[in-house]
Structure formats: structure tokens, C-alpha cells
Amino acid sequence: MEWTFNFFRWLHIIGGFVALLVFWIPIVTKKGGKTHNRIGWVYVYAMATVAVTALYLGIYRIFIEQGNDLERVSFSWFLIFISILSGASAWYGIRVLRFKQRKERHRSIVDLGFPLLLVGSGIAISLYGFQIGFPLLQYFPIVGIVVGTTHLLYWLRSPRLKGHWIIEHLGGMLACCISTITAFTVFGAPRLLNVDSVGFILWIIPSLVMTPLIIGFSTYYARKYNRPRSA
């Protein structure tokens, strides 16, 4: 089993590195353009790799290796939650484009299942974090709870804004970026800097930076596509 773990770990590292390398390109390039679309798919595939491998690595550490190190187990639960957050956000970002012409509520279990899982796992892992006194698990899942709730509300309501799919697509992909950068801050940066760990403030900086960016993009495109008509 160890060789399988190492294989998934390297896949996780490679996928994470590619995601970090390209995630900013679709943000700054023309939306819907060739570069945006092509690099966007590269990012999606990289994040799919990150999500699947993170899920495996977390499950392996907790249920197969069954170590007694509480900190190691806690970070493994964080890996699992990152897997759910990144997978749910990327899926949402793709699916809103698939149903951009919808006029009614959308109740497909395929699309409601991910945000339900995200909200449920966020609540459970946050409670676990408070039980063991681990700040990263106490507060970071709140991001997933908020993101999952907004996804649910979008699907369960009839669209009210023009260009709603663009707003939601960008929100989903930027939420995925939060998981990418946070995972690097928690796992990659300490190894590159040769330190044991980084503080809680650094863990939440990606969320503090990306959340206003999501709000800013959403506001911009909502105004762009919903300007009041002149008389």
C-alpha cells in the first residue's frame, strides 16, 4: 500500500503545482476567449487531480495507516475537506455554464449533492476542530459552509439576473482557488521554507484575499449585464 500512497502523493504534488502555476491566467484573460477556455480546462483537470488524490491521502492516513498523532490526523481531515471544497467548487463552476439557459429551479441530485456534502462536511469538521482545539479545522470549514449554501440557493431559485451563469462560474472557480492557495500555505510553503508549520493567520489569508475578489467580480458582472435601460 505504501507505493500506492507515494504514487498518489506525487500526483497530488504535480496537480497542485500545475494549478498554482495557471490559476491566475483565466482570471486576467478575456472571459470566454481561447486562452481563458484552454487554460481554464487545464486548471480544472489539475484541481480534479488534486481533489481525488487529497481524498485518498486523507483517508489513507486516518483509516489505513491509523496513526495516533492528533496533529497528523487533523491535517488529514483538512486534506479531505480541501478535496470536497475544491471538487464541489470546480464542478459548480462547470455546471452553471451547462445550464445557463435555465429559467426555473434546478433540482438535479448531481448538482445538489456536492453543495449538500460541502455544507454537511463543513459543519462536521468544524465541530471536530472545536472538540480537539485545532484552529484550522475550527474556522476554515466555515468557508465551505458559506460556499455550499450559496451554491444550493443558486440551484434552488429561479435565475433573477442576466448573465447569472458568468457570475456564478467566476465565483465557483475563485472559491476553488481558495482551496488551492490555502492547501499550498498549509502544506507546501512550510516545506519550501523549511519550517515546521505556519500560523493560523497565514492559513486564512487566502480566504481573506480571495473573498473580496469574488465579491468584486460578482458585483462588476451583475452591474454590467443588468444596467437599467435608458428611457
Image (cartoon, helix red, strand yellow):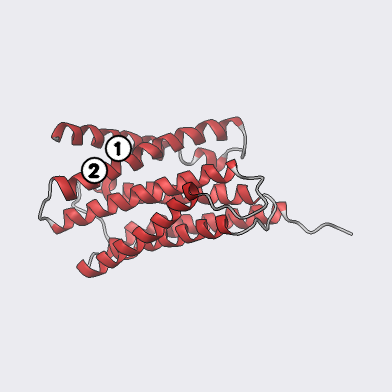
Which of the 4 image quadrants contains residue 137?
Answer: bottom left
Q: Residue at the location (48% across, 41% down)?
A: 24
Q: Earlier in the sequence, mark 1 or mark 2?
A: 1
Q: Residue at the location (61% across, 40% down)?
A: 31
166 and 124: which is toward the camera = 124
- Amino acid at dot 2: Leu
Q: Position of residue 146 (x, y in %)?
A: 45, 62
- Amino acid at dot 1: His
Q: Is residue 7 left or right of residue 27?
A: left
Q: Is 11 placed above or below 92 here?
A: above
Which of the 4 image quadrants contains residue 161?
Answer: bottom right
Badge number at residue 176? none
Q: Is 207 placed above or below 163 here?
A: below
Q: Residue at the location (43% across, 48% down)?
A: 88
Secondary structure of the residue carrying tag 1 is: helix
Q: Is residue 156 left or right of residue 229?
A: left
Quarter the C terminus occupies: bottom right
Callouts 1 and 2 close, C-beta under 8 Å:
yes
Q: Is residue 60 left or right of residue 214?
A: left
Q: Among all residues in the image, which is located at the extreme left?
A: 68
Q: Position of residue 139 (x, y in %)?
A: 34, 65
Secondary structure of the residue carrying tag 2 is: helix
Q: How much space separates mark 1 and mark 2, taking CA atoms?
A: 9 Å
49 and 33: which is toward the camera = 49
The residue carrying pointer 2 sits among few (fewer than 14), some (14 to 19) or many (20 or more) residues within 10 Å by Cα, namely: many
Q: Among all residues in the image, which is located at the extreme right?
A: 231
For disc 1, the marked residue is: 12
User: Is residue 61 shown to the viewer in this render?
Assistant: yes
Q: Residue at the location (58% across, 41% down)?
A: 98
Badge number at residue 57? 2
